[in-house]
Amino acid sequence: MQGKSIRLGIVVAEFNYDITQLMLQKALSHAKFLNAEVKVVIKVPGTFDMPLAIKKLLEKDFIDAVVTLGAVIKGETKHDEIVASQTARKIVDLSTEFNKPVTLGIIGHGATHEQAVERIEEYATRAVEAAIKLVQRTRKIDELKEVKETVIID
Ligand SMILES: Nc1c(NC[C@H](O)[C@H](O)[C@H](O)CO)[nH]c(=O)[nH]c1=O
Ligand SMILES: CC(=O)[C@@H](O)COP(=O)(O)O
């Protein structure tokens, strides 16, 4: 799978930056491996602060998809649930509002620091790969004309 001519934006949380900076490195290298272009990387204070940055990127014609990277780690209260669940909900809403993929590279909620560290590469590369696949496949939907036989898009 190649991400030729696919232009990505990345929104990365600074919160738990010991983890998210490594996620960013993995995401950038995976995007390069898949021949996708990362046009913009914007750092936001935390995961909860992502939606506005995501929306601003989606408004750009030169962005085909947005990748989010964050780590929501369990504290003493259920605040992590609010941060993660509300952001995830908004990510879905923005993706469908702008007809562009916004993929979820956010670890948690309820994760321990150790669990988050174990998931750095998996979540970062998965979010990049999903963004590229979705751009490629939704483009094929856009190109569809009259369908006489079942079309498999993969
Ligand atoms: N606890 C975590 C946060 N909390 C901060 C919020 O995301 C946000 O920056 C703040 O509420 C100001 O709006 N963020 C994470 O990314 N990860 C956490 O574990
Ligand atoms: C997920 C967070 O924002 C975290 O820092 C909250 O910690 P706490 O639940 O102890 O307030």
Image (tube, rainbow, N blue to C red):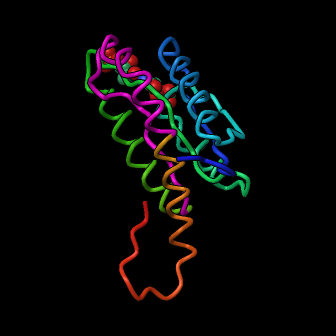
Left or right: residue 126 versus residue 118 is: right
Q: Is residue 98 magenta?
A: no
Quadrant in which the C terminus appears: bottom left
Q: Quadrant of residue 121?
A: top left
Left or right: residue 74 versus residue 143 is: left
Residue at 42% x, 53% y is 92
Q: Position of residue 124 (x, y in %)?
A: 47, 30
Q: Quadrant of ligand 1?
A: top left
Residue at 54% x, 63% y is 99
Front one among 41 and 78: 41
Q: Position of residue 90 (x, y in %)?
A: 44, 49
Q: Position of residue 73 (x, y in %)?
A: 35, 20
The residue range painted magenta reads 99-128
Classify 57 as above or below 138: above
**Residue 27 visible somewhere in the drawing:** yes
Residue at 36% x, 18% y is 116
Q: Position of residue 84 (x, y in %)?
A: 36, 35
Number of dots carrying numbers: 0
Residue at 51% x, 27% y is 46
Q: Is residue 113 magenta?
A: yes
Classify 7 as above or below 15: below
**Residue 56 visible somewhere in the drawing:** no
Classify 104 as above or below 75: below
